[in-house]
Image (tube, helix red, strand yellow):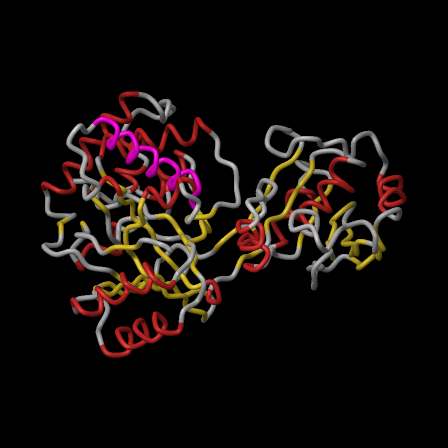
Amino acid sequence: MAILKPFKGIRPPQNIVKDLASRPYDVLNSEEAREEAKGNQYSLLHVTKAEIDCPAGIDEHSQEVYDKTVENFKKFRDNGWLVKDDEAKFYIYAQTMDGRTQYGIVGCSHIDDYFNNVIKKHELTRKDKEEDRMIHVRITNANVEPVFFSYPAHAEIDAIVEKIVKNEKPIYDFVADLDGFGHHFWIVNDKATNDRIEEIFAKEIPALYVADGHHRTAAAALVGKEKKANNPNHTGQEEYNYFMTVNFPDNQLKIIDYNRVVKDLNGLTEAQLLEKLQKSFDVKDQGTEIYKPNKLHEFSMYLGGKWYSMVAKQGTYNDNDPIGVLDVTILSNLVLDEILGIKDLRTDKRIDFVGGIRGLGELRRRVDNGEMKVAFALYPVSMKQLIDIADTNNIMPPKTTWFEPKLRSGLVIHELV
């Protein structure tokens, strides 16, 4: 069963939380972060992407940037912009997007659950990205940004959350100017309630699933393991045995599409590409208006100013294979690899990926401006598919899932001491 415990969070005062809370480090490049934090001394981007306070063009992995991270984090605490709670508690973090709200329990997961596969993964991680985040955890001695987990929905946890949300005023409640998403945050003050949440996870929640943040999860667990190895007096109770997670019930989450754009047609004409697609797909011309896939195994393609629907033919996929049934697998095998010659999605420079939050108009724009030659839109993966893959210890192809809204960083931080 899963370990989740309350902790003494480090949090901002109410009057600056909207300015301090920032988007995650990995959804912004350095220049975007510099622009987003411009004129805002409170933005946590000064800590999570400290290169914005260094000369433009600096290597974000340089020692100068890491030194600035430590300096800025200390400044935030010295100035009272981040203050540690006196008692260990759970928190509730809710997000609202397009009229739909999802409610997560903020607590600390155990590093052993990561290594013992109680915390289940569905993506591969890259060592260079792990190491970058490990350095950030080491130098701040904290989990500055949370990771996004899911758990099998549980009626009693739902009831506990509903009672708190209905009867207590959130400590933070704001709408982000940039995207219009709502962020709402409660402290679970009642000790009996905190104890019961911890007990339910320990006795009744069999697994947690990494939804978003595989590299941050790996980094937090690996740093905890390092600290354990380097402490001759290790007892197992130290705070470094835990890392901060936001845990949402699986039935509240929605995965949105993650689409593909390709630079060329691998030497084919548009007519030849359409002809080759007929082998594995029923292809129909849908005209010039944006066409969105409506069901599993249906794709849409934008080519030469027109949208096409593509439905995979029976026999081209295996519904009993948790990986083979995925639309990203079907598209990768039958189109990107077989026809367009793209063998490795992780390294091939001819392909790029576009999160569905940008809309299908972004696919059309990148083809129409000549940057790309063809675009493919996919039907979103379901939470059931994600869980099936994680439960069978399989790995999804790259760039399969896109979760929105992203967790805001800075609402609460977990210190490893």
Nearer to us in this view, 23 or 246: 246
Q: Residue at x 47, y 56 (%)?
A: 404
- Magenta part of the protein: which range? 213-230
Given residues 137 and 22, the one toward you in this image is 137
Left-right relation of 299 to 117: right
Residue at x 42% of width, y 40% of height:
26
Q: Position of residue 257 (x, y in %)?
A: 59, 54
The residue shown at (20%, 54%) is 16
Q: Is residue 252 left or right of residue 334?
A: left
> Percent position (x, y) of residue 281?
83, 51
User: Which picture quadrant has residue 337?
Assistant: top right
Residue 264 colored magenta?
Answer: no
The quarter of the picture where the N terminus appears is bottom left
> Would residue 143 be found to the left or right of residue 382 on screen?
left
Whether 222 is among the magenta residues is: yes
> Residue 221 location, x and y as percent?
34, 38
Mostly what secondary structure, the magenta segment? helix
x then y, percent, for residue 131: 38, 28
Give the tally of numbered discs. Answer: 0
Q: Toward the viewer: 165 or 35? A: 165
Q: Nearer the viewer, residue 352 or 140?
A: 140
Which residue corresponds to the image point at 69% horizontal and 45% vertical from the top-left?
329
Q: Quadrant of residue 271?
A: top right
Residue 367 vertical placement versus 257 (above, below)? above
